[in-house]
Amino acid sequence: MTTAPRSRPASVPPLPLAQESNPFVLHGCTLKLGSKLQETSRFSDDVWNLGPAMVKKHDRRFILDFRLIPAAHRHGGKELCYAMLSGPAPCGETQPAAATVRTVFTELVRFLRWAAARSGRLETLSGADLEDYQRFLIQSLPRASARQSARAGARKFWLWRSCLSSDALRFDPGHIDGWGENAAHRRENTTARIPEEVLGPLFVWSMRFIDDFRADILAADRAWHTPAPPVEPPAYGQVSGLVRAWLDGQLATGQPLPGWRGKPSLTAIAHAVGCSRISVSRHRRMIDETAALAGIRPQPVSEQPIRGRLDGQPWIQGILADYNEPDSLANLARLLQDACYVVLAFLSGARDSELKHLQRGCLAVERDADGRPYRWKMHSLAFKGESNPAGTPATWSIGEPAARAISVLEQLQPPDSDYLFAPLPHTPGALPDAANQVLSSGATNARLNRYTAWINDYCQRHKRNDCIPAIDQQQWHLTNRQFRRTLAWYIARRPGGVIAGALAFRHHCIQVFEGYAGTSDSGFRAEVESEQALARGEHLIAAIDAHEHTTLTGPAADEAARRLKEFGTRARFHGTVILDEARLRRLMTRHDPAVYPGHYVTCVHDHTKALCEKARNQRSENLPDHGGCKPLACHNVALTPENTAAWQREINRINHRLASRPPLPPLLQHQLQARHEEITAFLQRNNPTPPESA
């Protein structure tokens, strides 16, 4: 059934395009440095180039091709896109970025083509027509998120109706039954986190590249950039003898000739002989005959020995010049850059756009009086939540492994390249006429998956068992967005654990929250809190299932039991307990019981009684401050048997210290005795039969 539509108010006149009849469509946008408005697209053009308005270094160059829209609706589509690009935006709407307009354009084309097939203007569409569009989307788009994007694009013709002289919808399609399909789902973070069994070896291999392999790759890179020293050409008639002598030496020692793409490398032979490539090429027949006897080996970039070790052996036989080889400098340099991206993306909490704007000199190191580094800070630009579309300067506190990654990237880039994630020059045609100053998000995603493929191929070739495992019999597909979500998950779920057996999460949590990741605009703290709430929900449901909430003691035990019983009732769906992450996340958002399990106490939070909130004078947040908890005095405390056992172990530790010899200083002994009496009285009040000493 269709809800009665709301008509378009006649009192809202359409806004003119601009004072001139054929304006520059990007006149309201921030343009790239060096772009001139006079050289940008005009309204009358059938193809609009959005490149000058793509101010982020990693943005792709997009166009709006209005030839894809049927002629009857083309002018209306142009008006809408012009309004979104240069405004003014209607009341309640914000001016989207140029890249967002390009994304919306795809859905506008879909909707207008469908509308043209019905032989009517948008103003004539009824609720029944848009219900047909709903059915069309269900048939053509299998994913609910794709259908929601398509509906959002079509709804622009209502939300931006004041900017259209014609071809606007006459009612809000949001009132059509089912138009808001999956609306709750869209508000959730649906980015998958990287499974632990994938992240572990991925991070280990990335640190191997940064710590163990980088010296060989950077040495080969320097050799590749270093021009061959000039040689004095041999006298006329001596070239043949020199080439023959060198070839005979290769045969005598059993060494294959250096090759390039399956053939002897004339450049390498000329360099070895000390003459020009043209001179050597005259003896191609002699060289080919020797190659047939001695064989061909891929040409290394340099003859320097490999220094990096893996299990005591050189990690690679040589770094090759042929960029088509798996062990070529072009490939290994890209893999080193990808390894640095993995480490930075995971350990900093920065978004892809923020990493792509890292420049040479972005790392600041703070040192103590003895010159030892103790804090590393990374400077870049932030975009999300910022008013400046070109980015706002921001700072991240990072750990020393991430700082090493930045140092490697600075060495890997040529001296004239400022951006650390600019394309590398080792592959022919990699830099001239590049569409982006830095790698686009799509290019990074593709390279991350090629990186894992190389690791697995390397493990297969060397019969190693530390490859990237398959998940559900499929290779895990990495995307740049997953690293930030995964870091939030690890901080929430593994606060006392370590990353790849080396980096403590508790320490790392302090680092990332010290810098930009802890500010409200970054959203990272909210992501961590969301993951913590999800973990808490899973724990509470398991406790309710085991009826553990009925054994609580302490001043807030009855309140905890009541809240958890109600939460358990809501958690059951058709007789089964919610295990689906999305449903559990929605349940915690709407019906969080505010019960926080802990080591010593279970907090049943009531901000009117919370001593931690009174101490920090921030009652407006209505959130507990577990760092300022006063468990022995607060009325929000409940105790599980595990909590009581933890207190008893604390009493045992105090007893052990009081009985130590030599005796403790009197003041310390008095403080410990008072602490012992306070805990004992607390347990006697709230748990008359405490467990035996552990």
Image: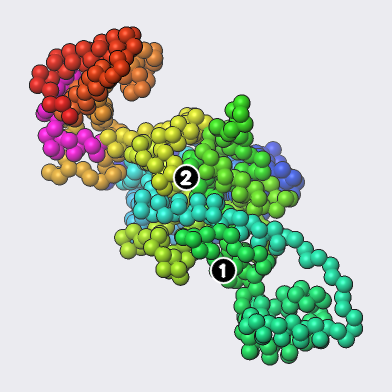
Horizontal relation, residue 612 to residue 438: left or right:
left
Q: What label sits on residue 317 in the rendered view?
A: 1
Task: Please say whether residue 107 is visible from this viewpoint.
Answer: no
Residue placed most toward the observer, 48 or 562: 562
Q: What label sits on residue 346 in the rendered view?
A: 2
Label 1 neighbourhood size at 10 Å, few (<14), some (14-19), many (20+)?
Answer: few
Give the residue type at disc 2: Phe
Q: Quick one: which residue is furthest to the left in this view?
A: 689
- The magenta stretch is 537-558
Measured Cα–Cα span from mark 2 to mark 1: 31 Å
Give the residue type at disc 1: Gln
149 above or below 506? below
267 above or below 561? below
Q: Position of residue 335 (x, y in %)?
A: 55, 58
Q: Residue at x 45, y 51 (%)?
A: 203
Residue 121 in magenta stretch: no
Q: Circle 2 — which element?
A: helix
Label 2 neighbourhood size at 10 Å, few (<14), some (14-19), many (20+)?
Answer: many
Q: Residue at x 65, y 61 (%)?
A: 220
Q: Circle 1 — which element?
A: loop
Q: Considering the image in quadrants, where does the C terminus appear?
A: top left
Q: Which residue is drawn at 87% across and 72% down?
A: 232
Task: Please say whether residue 690 is visible from this viewpoint.
Answer: yes
Residue placed most toward the observer, 502 or 267: 502
Q: Where is residue 528 in the image (x, y as percent from the top left)?
A: 39, 35
Q: Can you tell which of label 2 and label 1 is closer to the viewer?
A: 1
Q: Where is residue 90 in the image (x, y as percent from the top left)?
A: 53, 34
Q: What label sits on residue 536 in the rendered view?
A: none
304 above or below 559? below
Q: Which residue is drawn at 10% across and 18% down?
A: 688
Residue placed most toward the observer, 71 or 384: 384
Going from the N terminus, do you reach mark 2 or mark 1 first? Answer: 1
